Amino acid sequence: MCGIVGYIGYRDTNPILIEGLKRLEYRGYDSAGVCILVDGETVIVKDKGKVSHLESLLDAKNVHSTIGIGHTRWATHGEPNFVNAHPHSNEEGDIVLIHNGIIENFNTLKKSLITQGYTFKSDTDTEVLAHLIDVFMKKGNKLFRAVRLALSEVEGTYGLAVISSREPNILIAARKGSPLVIGVGDKENFIASDVSALITHTKQVVYLDDGEVAEITAEGFRVKTVQDEEISKEVTEVFLTLEELDRGGYDTFMLKEIMEQPESVLNSLRGRLLLDEGTSKLGGLENVLDKLVTAKRFILTACGTSWHSGLVAEYMFEQYLRIPTEVEYASEFRYRNPIIEPGDAIFFISQSGETADTLAAMHEAKRKGALCIGICNGVGSSIARDSDSGVYIHAGPEIGVASTKAFTSQLTVFALITLLLARKKDMSLADGKIIVEEFKLLPGKIKKILELRSRIEEIAEVFKDTPNFLYLGRGYNFPVALEGALKLKEISYIHAEGYPAAEMKHGPIALVDKNMPVVFIAPKDSTYDKINSNIQEIKARKGIVIAIATEDDDRIDTIADYSIKIPGTIRMLTPILSVIPLQLLAYFIAKKKGLNVDQPRNLAKSVTVE
Ligand code: M6R
């Protein structure tokens, strides 16, 4: 979604802003812009389109500065065009800002500003902020205070960066519900909405919390709350390398991330398996372990792919822990006044840790006194920091918009949690040891599936022009069917639906004819015979069957049109393997259609608006 970078120091700001914005491109955007201060004047360069286009506009202008802010916009209010692109300014053009988030009361603020004589150029909610700050500066306030006074009138969310030619040596940053981090350098400082935009310059960072505003100079920074309270902030170190952020020789981030799964799953497991005790060790849950073991109910809430991992976890928790578990979309949970009772523990699952709906659902649950557990990939992310306890999935940075390795790492972590709690409850040492052994085999099994790449690519060639797909699975593999369908639709724009296989008879089977490919996730488990009957039902209607089956399953070859064989494992871990061919199938279909798989249309990597 929208991205923010900012710089103040002694170097030419242009390459720093452009590089930072390029690092944020993966989040998805439709326009980009910068503002720098040149000879006491603000210079804004912006347009619809890519950062590379912005870069050439900036080069052509040949202006330079040592202070500037840059933005990538993903439209929420007003279409993507030059006028609506950020930065925005007050009428005189001497207060300039960029903003992520949504100003919910912008209509009320806009009407009031219009009655005070202000005129508006854009359709954005952001522009009101520039005028509002202007109001307070004209009343004699310095920029830092004027921003805080303006923000005290604002309802909604913001990650904000402001500069002004009236005070050319400071950069103001503010955060509420939209991440913002300060990068601390030597005689220079940075801001960004995501550490990936600044780690080439510094690894020392300060995460702003909601309601905080920072005044940043080349020499240092200070932070106050919107209500004027001075805050002392801790500088922390980020452990992320540039190689981790680059494509590592692959065509796309998505393929790199799919291929990385043997290592990313291994990283999720690293140091967490205790073979002798037949259990796992999760430091982040130690302080709440008793509460989890005795919990009366688990609620899992998330969006998109993370929600699918919650659905798989529901099967794990209910099979091994016998704790009633509910899975809910975060966007629904937050608004329906959920019933939260003593003994409930709520898991908030998010790759980015910044998804607005999931974060807001967590704040709502906290208000109601629930125990909140974050399952995140983004280290230091808002969900990770605001939860009571949690587990990092350690999948490494996921850049491709389509979530792949984060999903398998989320499942790995949920299986680790299941083992840990089951061993505290009634699972025997012997059973625990069997599961630990199965965990250890996972990376090797994933490698074997990835070796089937070219076979899956051949299947993709056959189906690249197909307009519709069905994905069917049962039990643990029903959520995998949903995930396979989501992967295909989001990057290939092919309409795809996932269903529990038996549910097909209650409607979707009407769609089946000789042109309809149906992907069955049919490993050899307790539902195998049932799913075989479902395959027969599709074949009887001349549908085309692509089966994801277990290696030693020869029977499936006699009924399916195409089969992809995966190694066997215990039921709980099967989705970690069965989803991988579906990720590859979606990937190759989208590539063969010539689409941008890393940044599919209309999508953002991190959805920080509701
Ligand atoms: O960062 P999160 O896990 O909270 O993101 C949730 C969804 O936005 C995300 O999974 C989305 O559905 C992906 N594009 C799926 O590939």
Image: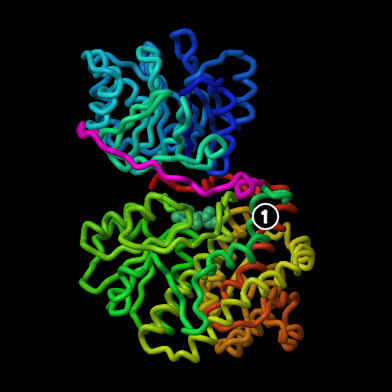
Residue extent of the magenta highlight: 226-246
Q: Counting other residues with Cα less than 10 Å from the Cα at mark 1, is it few (<14), some (14-19), or many (20 or more)?
A: many
**Residue at 62 percent of width and 80 percent of height:** 522
Q: Name the residue under label 1.
A: 256
| Image colouring | rainbow
Q: Nearer the viewer, residue 44 or 429?
A: 429
- The image position of residue 580, as x and y in percent, is 64, 67
Question: In the figure, 383 relative to 569: above or below?
Answer: above
- The image position of residue 483, as x and y in percent, is 55, 65
Residue 318 placement, left or right of 26: left
Question: In the figure, 539 relative to 392: above or below?
Answer: below
Residue 550 seen in render = yes
The amino acid on which the numbered mark 1 sits, given as a three-letter code, is Lys
Residue 506 seen in render = no
Query: Is residue 350 located in the magenta-colored stretch of the structure?
Result: no
**Residue at 49 percent of width and 11 percent of height:** 38
Residue 182 placement, left or right of 258: left
**Residue at 54 percent of width and 21 percent of height:** 11
Name the image quarter holding residue 472. Answer: bottom right
Q: Is the magenta stretch mostly helix, strand or loop?
A: loop
- The image position of residue 507, as x and y in percent, is 52, 74
Q: Nearer the viewer, residue 148 or 205?
A: 205
SS class of the residue under badge 1? helix
Residue 565 placement, left or right of 345: right
Residue 436 placement, left or right of 336: right
- The image position of residue 10, as x and y in percent, is 51, 20
Name the image quarter holding residue 392. Answer: bottom left
**Residue at 58 percent of width and 49 percent of height:** 399
Query: Is residue 229 located in the magenta-colored stretch of the structure?
Result: yes
